[in-house]
Amino acid sequence: MERKGSAVWTGGLKDGKGTVSTESGILVNTPYSFQARFEEGAGTNPEELIGAAHAGCFSMALSGQLEKEGLKAERIETTATVSLEKSDNGFSIPAIHLTVTARIPNADKHAFEQAAKNAKEGCPVSKLMKANITMQATLEN
């Protein structure tokens, strides 16, 4: 299975602008920019999109882990805080912090904590940071 996201960027880094789109059409030419990433400009940014993807993936994975234990969540709310930091080597994402609140009838603390740990380790987006990234780059004339 493959899913696609795309981006178009025009202009320089600070004065340029871009749009991101998803294959499903949920995002269509959604604006992003330097200002949206590093300042308080309108639009989205890569870290925000990574956070949303991680929060969504983790919530689904936690639901699956709970079902393995015979539990069903009424609600799982996850926020993924993506840290973008600048160092001598440029920018990097050294950490993502998941904040999770769940309402699960008949769940005890230990079962919930174990399911959350398993979900954090097993979520495909959590594993992404270890991904083999390949590329084909083409320069148009």
Image (tube, helix red, strand yellow):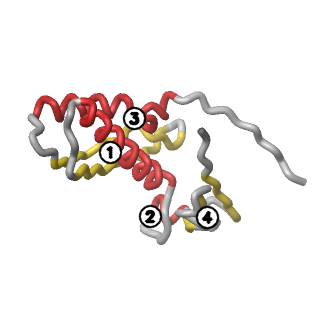
Q: Nearer the viewer, residue 57 or 133?
A: 57
Please state which amino acid type lies under the numbered disc 4: Thr
Residue sitting at 67 percent across and 61 percent down? 9
Q: Which of marks 2 and 3 precedes in the sequence?
A: 2
CA separation in Å, label 4 and label 2: 17 Å
Could you say which quadrant of the image residue 135 lies in? top right
Residue 79 location, x and y as percent?
30, 51
Mark toward the start of the polypeptide (1 vs 3): 1
Q: Secondary structure at mark 1?
A: helix
Q: Which mark is residue 39?
A: 2
Image mark for residue 123:
3
Looking at the image, residue 25 lies above or below residue 83: below
The spot of residue 93 in percent (x, y) is 45, 41
Distance CA(mark 4)–CA(mark 3): 27 Å
- N-terminal of the pair, mark 1 or mark 4, is 4
Circle number at residue 59:
1
Q: Is residue 123 above or below residue 50?
A: above
> What kind of residue is marked 1?
Ser
* Residue occupying the point 9% across, 40% down: 106
Q: At which x and y percent is residue 31?
A: 56, 68
- The residue depicted at 59 percent of the width and 66 percent of the height is 28
In contact (CB < 8 Å): disc 1 and disc 2: no
